[in-house]
């Protein structure tokens, strides 16, 4: 039986992942500022969730991913965000400088140089299993395809990947507890979001083609100018 997740739980996990990422960024660089641009259309199409403004004036783009699986030690690299519309996944097009991947239930935060990870992954994309995530919002259902990559492979293959344990001194918030609850789909009701293996040859070929196309296409680095005047500061945007 396929696992299913409520949309509320998925959003709660994402919010908590962003909160953990923001906390780590501010602690790593005292005096820096973090701006949440998840709702800003200028950054949505660039795959950037946060802007990290360092005391030196440098601004780095951050992509955040939250994973609530209790046992998985693997990354899910999104290759196709909407299979029905043939839209590329965030992992392929994101202009972020860093990918912050948060394993919520395992209490671990990984920080990766996104471009270096992407350059390492693309030539060996066919070596990894594809999985399909089915998301339903109202009457609309779409499929996301991603590669499942063991964390060990990335750590060994890419320099400067950090693994930071999350602080457990503060109890989990209600949203995070809800986000970690897995609902088993009943035969009478369709799942809200389900993660299953396989999915058909056409889907696998499409995802592989996306990865191959990205490997041979020139990459443009997103530039962000004066974000402090355009984005909300971390002090006024607490994800609780």
Image (tube, rainbow, N blue to C red):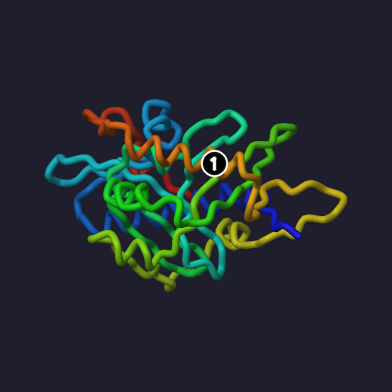
Q: Position of residue 155 (x, y in %)?
A: 32, 65
| Relative depth, front residue between 171 and 112 | 112
Residue 232: which quarter of the image? top left
Q: Which element is circle 1 on?
A: helix
Q: Residue at x 37, y 37 (%)?
A: 214
Q: Position of residue 60 (x, y in %)?
A: 25, 42
| Relative depth, front residue between 219 and 227 | 219
The reply to whether residue 180 is visible in this rendering is yes
Drawn side of residue 61 relative to residue 75, left or right: left
Residue 152: which quarter of the image? bottom left
**Mark 1 highlights which residue?**
205
Q: Residue at x 31, y 41 (%)?
A: 96
Drawn side of residue 150 relative to residue 230, left or right: right
Q: How many marks?
A: 1
Drawn side of residue 115 relative to residue 54, left or right: right
Q: Residues within 10 Å of mark 1 (few under 14, many from 20)?
A: few
As drawn, the residue found furthest toward the left would be 56
Q: Residue at x 65, y 47 (%)?
A: 199
Q: Residue at x 54, y 52 (%)?
A: 130
Q: Position of residue 74 (x, y in %)?
A: 47, 63
Query: Which image quadrant: the N terminus?
Result: bottom right
As drawn, the residue found furthest toward the bottom would be 169
| Relative depth, front residue between 176 and 62 | 62
Q: Where 213 falls versus 131 (above or below)? A: above
Q: Position of residue 42 (x, y in %)?
A: 37, 26
As drawn, the residue found furthest toward the right would be 188
| Relative depth, front residue between 84 and 175 | 84
The reply to whether residue 16 is visible in this rendering is no
């Amino acid at each position: 039986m396929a696992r299913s997740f409520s949309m509320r739980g998925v959003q709660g996990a994402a919010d908590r992942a962003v909160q953990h990422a923001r906390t780590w960024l501010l602690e790593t660089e005292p005096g820096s500022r973090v701006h949440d641009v998840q709702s800003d259309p200028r950054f949505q199409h660039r795959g950037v969730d946060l802007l990290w403004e360092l005391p030196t004036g440098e601004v780095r783009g951050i992509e955040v991913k939250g994973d609530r699986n209790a046992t998985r030690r693997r990354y899910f690299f999104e290759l196709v965000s909407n299979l029905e519309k043939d839209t590329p996944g965030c992992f392929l097009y994101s202009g972020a400088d860093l990918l912050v991947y948060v394993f919520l239930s395992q209490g671990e935060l990984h920080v990766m140089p996104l471009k270096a990870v992407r350059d390492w992954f693309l030539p060996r994309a066919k070596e990894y299993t594809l999985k399909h995530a089915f998301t339903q919002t109202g009457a609309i259902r779409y499929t996301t395809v991603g590669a499942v990559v063991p964390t060990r492979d990335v750590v060994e293959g890419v320099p400067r990947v950090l693994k930071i344990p999350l602080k457990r001194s503060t109890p989990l918030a209600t949203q995070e507890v809800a986000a970690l609850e897995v609902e088993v789909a009943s035969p009478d009701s369709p799942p809200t979001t389900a993660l299953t293996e396989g999915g058909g040859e056409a889907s696998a070929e499409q995802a592989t083609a996306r990865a191959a196309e990205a490997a041979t296409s020139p990459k443009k680095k997103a530039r962000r100018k004066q974000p402090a005047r355009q984005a909300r500061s971390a002090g006024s945007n607490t994800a609780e």
